[in-house]
Amino acid sequence: MTTPETLAAMIPDGASVILPKGEGPDAPVALAKALIRRGARDLHLITLPACAAPVSGMMVDMLIGAGCVARVETSGVSLGELGPAPAFNRAVTSGAVTVTDATCPALYAAVQAGGKSQPFATLRGIIGSDLERMRDDWVVIDNPFQPGDKVVALKAINPDVAMFHAPMADREGNLWIGRGRDLLYAAHASKVVLATVETVVDTCFYDDDALAAGVLPAFYVSAIAHAPGASLPMRMDATVDLDAVRAYAGAARSEAGLQDWLAREVFAARSAAE
Amino acid sequence: MTEIRDEEVLATAIADLLDGARHIAVGMASPLPATGALLARERSGGAMQVSILGNAKASRWTNGGPELFDLAGRGGIDGFFLSGGQIDGRGNINLVGVGDYPQSTVRWSGSFGSAYLYFVVPRVILFRWEHSRRTLVEAVDFVSAPGTSEPGVHRTGGPIALITNLCLFAFDRDRARFRLQSVHPGHTLDEVRDNTAFDFDLPETVPQTPLPDAETLRAIRGPVAERVATIYPVFARQVFGAAIPAA
């Protein structure tokens, strides 16, 4: 059991990092802040499949605004009901960050192919869109079992790192993720899996079948930090402190405002806690 | 609350389009489409399933994010809503941005599931509240998902209609063209023409979008409003005011 700072030190510059969509309290906000403090650079973020909820979108946006990110592969980045992600939009229109646009089921299929150690997955749809035209890792092929039937082959995705926040770890280091199956798919495909957890229990999830159904086994997990509140401003009941996200969105509308916000909420907040 | 609101007219038009469906999925930030879908559910006596994406309490998924797409692929989702920063006359939608990709002059959030669901959901309703020449364009700058596909491309789904704050268009898949179906109360055909940059077909006479009848209004303002308020409290307060009990 370690700290978010230690986890952040395990993510090298240039790493590809897969992030959850943040509909539930799985966005690893505290770990993202630790990455910003460590001055991470050239990260390649992959959202599974989008970070378009207020908190997950804010997390991606602050990483971009802090200069940690070179590329984003995504089906969507926004602050959800609170509108566009300001730093993401600025970085894409200026060219400071390269965006690789995807569509949700294609990211899932490519990540699941990665988890199965297969070279690619195939998917229907997509053909005739500019998404397909802009990418060389998606290729239209003939269905080998039914010539003339076209499908898209999607190159598998195996991220260097998966990072997320989970509700519980047990004494063996198993993570309870409940219905949040996306965390399972991200972990299966990734070389290193780093998690912050809300609580640590002195039991074993496998002693209870109802709990065992929602477990990510310890053998996928590289390191865990016990960090209550690490998904804030999303609380563990999946409610969000929208005022906190609004304050971020307001600040991030200008580059100077964003840098002030980072100084206050990421750098100074940590010093005060120490 | 006796005056009929625009939102109630649109929700009724949406519910009419979804009549007979078994399972409708609604995207995260889509309160008005959700109101229409929940009205259709109410009319079905609760037989219709409505899954509100991004709201764990309003959906029954157990296999994570892929499940919606897997279910849609096997024909299990009958209706879905898509929008676009731009929508063109061939039913192509753009959720990515304005100008030359990738350095768009205006960047939107992204294509989400559109490039798959548009292909496999039989009744996709395009919904764009702002009806203007910058939203309803002649040709989109980026195709997130195409309105129609060439032969040889698996295509069991696609757009059936486009609904805006001014009117309702039906989509003809064979001709890849919209046809004006009705104009909402208080608006005119000229207004639709002036604010649409693409060419569309016209019936001989253009009807007005029907107003909800008394039974529909009771459903919208009663059980539907209550349900909407639990998912979209801000929207429910704006549209239904204090008439609904607190969620």
Image: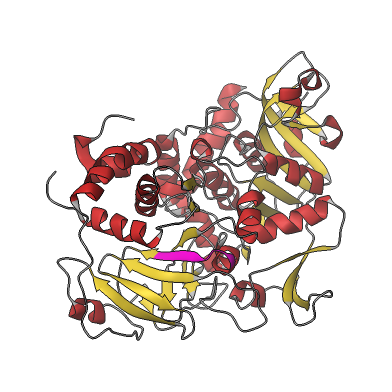
Q: Is residue B121 magenta?
A: yes
Coordinates of residue A136 in the picture (x, y in percent): 74, 74
- What residue is at 56 percent from the left and 24 percent from the top? A272
Query: Which image quadrant for residue B1?
Result: top left
Can see residue A72? Answer: no
- What residue is at 31 percent from the left and 66 percent from the top? B164
Q: Which coloring applies here?
A: secondary structure
Q: Image height check: is A1 above or below B66? A: above
Coordinates of residue B46 in the picture (x, y in percent): 42, 42
Image quadrant where one finds the C terminus of chain A:
top right
Q: Is residue B159 magenta?
A: no
Coordinates of residue A227 in the picture (x, y in percent): 66, 25
Q: Nearer the viewer, residue A262 or B204?
A: B204
The stretch in magenta equals B120-126
* Left or right: A19 in relation to B29: right
Coordinates of residue B117 in the picture (x, y in percent): 57, 63
* Left or right: A246 in relation to A191: left
Q: Image height check: is A111 above or below B90? A: above
Q: Image height check: is B234 above or below B161? A: above
Q: Nearer the viewer, residue A167 or B107?
A: A167
Can see residue B130? Answer: yes
Query: Which image quadrant for residue B244?
Result: top left
Q: How many dots with numbers? A: 0
* Left or right: B182 in relation to A51: left
